[in-house]
Every structure is written in structure tokens, then in C-alpha cells.
Image (cartoon, rainbow, N blue to C red):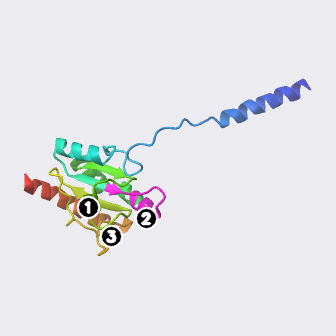
Amino acid sequence: MLRLVVFALFLGICASAGKQKKKETPQSLSRGWGDSIRWVKNYEAGLSEMVKRNKPLMVIHHQDNCPHSQALKKAFAADKSIQKMAEKDFVMVNLLLETTDENIAPDGHYVPRILFVDPSKTVHTEIVGKFPTHRYTYEPADMILLAKNMKKAKIILKAEL
């Protein structure tokens, strides 16, 4: 009987050791878009940081429950050239919530969409994706186009200096 109790106690300890509670860690600001990139907390912080660092702001609107956003995030995070440019040449923000600035939704509120803002706080509506409607949307297959548009945003900033 004593052996049975000790055995049951041992099994209980082993089972509880395997089910250790994971500490909940707060989600990083990257939200899966690239952990090596320095992300700002929100749009307002992005505008401020953009002016301070004299770099263009790249604004990514997305939703966690949107399959198109999730697919774009995966492609964005996997593309080394985009990750490098984002880390080095841009102030980066990814937004789950819309901003009150209507300039950042020139053709509507949809996700995913990516826009570029320069340090004079001009939203560059001429830097677009391939779709005639939802002009600021990109798909996973559009990473070459997105990289070209990131380069355009950098060139515009240099031309304005």
C-alpha cells in the first residue's frame, strides 16, 4: 500500500513538472514582422521618431485575425533584403488599430496596407502596390515590388535634403 502511495505521488510530481506554467511574456512590438527591427509603439511615436532620426516612416496596417495580413507578415519577415532596409533605413511601425490621421488611409481603411511618410510628415501616396483599388496593399509574392518601393521612399528623402 505504501509503495502504491509513493508511486502515485512520484507520478503526480513528474506530471506537474511536465506541465510547468509558461510565463506570459508581453508581445514584442514586432508582432512577428521582424524581431531585429527597431519598432515604435504607435503612429504618433513614429512621427516623432521619424523627425528626430530624419528617416522615412514605414506604416504597416494589419490585423492578427486577417489571413492576408498573416501571409504578408510571413513573407515580409522572411525577406532578408526588406528586413535589412527596414532595420537600417526606416522608422518602423505596425498598427493593429487605425489612426485618427485620415492622410494615412488615402483610399480607405483596409488591411494589409503599407504607406510611407517622410520627415516633413508628407504621406507619399504615389508609392503604391500593384492593385488599382486598395493601392497600398501587397501580397506575399510582391516582396520585390515592396523592396523597390522602400528604395523609392529612401530616394525621395535624399532628394528632399
Disc 3 to disc 1, C-alpha distance: 18 Å
Q: Tell me where the magenta segment starts and ends, as one range.
A: 60-73
The answer to whether residue 22 is above or below residue 137 is above
Q: In x, y percent, where is residue 74? A: 41, 58
Labels 3 and 1: the sequence-earlier one: 3
Labels 2 and 3: the sequence-earlier one: 2
Tell me the amino acid under the disc marked 2: His
Disc nearest the viewer among 1 and 2 = 2
Tell me the amino acid under the disc marked 1: Ala
Disc 2 to disc 3, C-alpha distance: 13 Å
Return the residue at label 2.
68
Residue drawn where x is 53% and y is 38% of the image: 24
Q: In x, y percent, where is residue 43? A: 30, 48
Specify whether 139 is left or right of 119. Answer: right
Using a 10 Å C-alpha cutoff, classify the residue at mark 3 as few (fewer than 14 neighbours), some (14 to 19) or many (20 or more). some
The answer to whether residue 96 is above or below residue 110 is above
User: In front here: 26 or 145?
Assistant: 26
Return the residue at label 3.
134
